Amino acid sequence: MADIALTRALDPEAAIAGRRYFRSRTIIYGLLTIFAIVYLLPLVVVILNSFRQLPEIAQNGLIAWPRSFSFKAWVDAWSTYCVGGTCAGMQGNFFNSLKLAIPATIISTAIGAINGYILSKWKFRGSEILFGCMMLGVFMPGQVALMPWAYILGTLHLTNSTYGLILIHCVQGISFTTLFCRNFYVNIPDDLIKAARIDGAGFWRIFRKIILPLSPPILIVTVIWQFTGIWNEFLYAVIFTSGREQPITAALVALSTNGTNVRVYDVMSAAVLIGALPPLLVYLLGGKYFVRGLTQGAIK
Amino acid sequence: MQSVLEPSAAAAGPSWRERLAQAVPFLVLAPSLAATLIYVFVFTGWTLYISLSNSSLLPTYKFIGLKPYADLWANTRWNIAYHNLFIFSAFYVVGAMAVGLLLAIVIDQRVRGEAIWRTIFLYPLAVSFVVTGTVWSWLYTPDTGIQLFVRSLGWSNFTFALTTDRNLALYAIVITGIWQSSGFAMALFLAGLRSVDQDIIKAAQIDGAGVFRIYARVILPTIAPIFLAVMVVLLQFAIKTFDLAIALTNGGPGIATTFPAIYVYDLMFQRGQIAQGAAAAIMILAALAVVLVPYSLWLVWRKRREGKNG
């Protein structure tokens, strides 16, 4: 574009076009900037307030340039702040979420990969229908499963424990992970599998030697999807756990409705960031795969 | 793999070892398949049955017919929740799609630093509704948030107190919902815009069509299926709205921002009216079905038609 504009510098029509181009660029970048400010404002506000001191926040409000600086809110939020009688900050809840999200992600992704492999490369009579039925799980609203889960967790003595939530997220995750992996494996040529079978390779050998080496892209998508989803989940967390067993999302709500007196915005800001950081990091590190998961999860 | 489930007809059929090898895929699939099918069908049936029983504090299995549903629809709070769901869905879906489309079109104009802009608009999606709702509730609080900020700039009469006004609190949730989800709409629209055949656009340009005309007449109609997909997904989010409303307004002020999902939670686990809570859960499922069944049928129909036309 630039060198064309140069050669026609004296052409009046080009000058008008250039001016119009400049104006449209201004509008475009202006719009993007305004929206970017709106999108970033809450994040910036929380980050800044987590380093401000409470008296200053109380005086100047949340949206103000910081005039004080301290790490105290972070220390409090992590290890000493009291919620509902226990004064250990959010660290316990943070680790609960890790202990929940990591195993549930690994298990559900592994199952999804194997299921996807079977449903794309080892089809049997009725497998397409079974796959369709499994996909209904993607759309199930959590509310419909609440009473059954309450009964099952009660019977297995898994209420108020991370293991109960792991079980729930594994079962509910299978539909998603199977869908993702199956749709990816379908595009691997069947000839590859046939050739391997003629060479005498069996079910597991083909999975290990052919499917798994081709899988990293879809496994990353699935892991990111499952991890952020499970980390951010709230309904089951708040219903089936309480107090020290709560994952971070439920604990955050308990913290912010805890307020008998003045809201401790500095500590709560730090607590919110502690809860938001893992999925944000995953998003920033694996952005491309995150978006791919979104678009696949949405359209298919 | 055709014959896993049938005994082999041939007398000199495969040995048990071969047969076992053939059955492996199904045997491996079976446990997780069973778990998922139980989750989908048994759980739904179970909740449906509870919704027709006289369960109160604990689930019981005495069948009493549709009475819980009658009670549900006679309940003011449920009707408010249901009404809220309609208003919220309409504004939220249209708003998120409009903002998402605008952002997608703007980003599609070969802007510099596209990856950075996209990262900014999409990050809210990585964060939980709880986090979003909590932070926005602070921003909406008049004496600490946006209102105070604008007043401190000198506009001393400025009022922005959505969450304390029972007529406006719902729109606070709408705005936050749009903030959270428009990046998602943007990502899908952008993918759609990029998939449009460049030759068609060039042909329209040669015919002298302006940018707006090209978008309105050529590009947007070709990505119509994406509009539908985005709409269906956003409607699903709206119907399942729970965390965001809890963290943002906790259903208040009063019961002004109750949603069906909050109602289910409240009746089942706070008030011990399990049958009516289950009935409300079934209504949520029905609402999802109203959105998803026609959509899936349309998808199947379109696939068949494409298949026929080659």
Image (spheres, coloured by chain):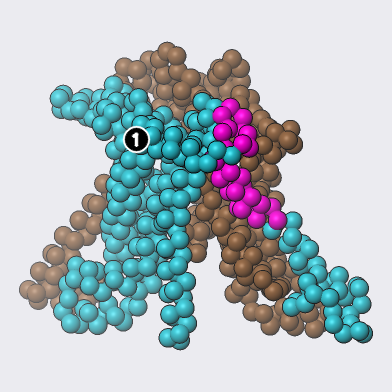
Chain colours: A brown, B cyan
Work out which residue is located at the far front of the displayed protein and give it.
B64
Q: Is residue B45 magenta?
A: yes
Q: Nearer the viewer, residue A89 or A113?
A: A113
Q: Which image quadrant is residue A166 in?
A: top right
Q: Nearer the viewer, residue B1 or A36?
A: B1
Q: Is residue B244 magenta?
A: no
Q: Nearer the viewer, residue B255 or B120?
A: B255
Q: Which residues are magenta?
A: B34-62
Q: Position of residue B245 (x, y in %)?
A: 41, 35
Identified at 22% across, 68% down, the residue is: B216
Quadrant of the snapshot with the N terminus of chain A: bottom left
Q: Which image quadrant is residue A196 in?
A: bottom right
Q: Chain of mark 1?
A: B
On screen, residue B167 versus residue A245, left or right, reads: left
- Give the secondary structure at mark 1: helix
Report the amino acid beneath label 1: Ile
On screen, residue A205 versus residue A153, left or right, reads: right
Work out which residue is located at the far bottom of the displayed protein and give it.
B310
Identified at 15% across, 68% down, the residue is: A18
On screen, residue A49 versus residue A77, left or right, reads: left
Q: Residues within 10 Å of mark 1 (few under 14, many from 20)?
A: some
Instruction: Name the residue carrying label 1.
Output: B80
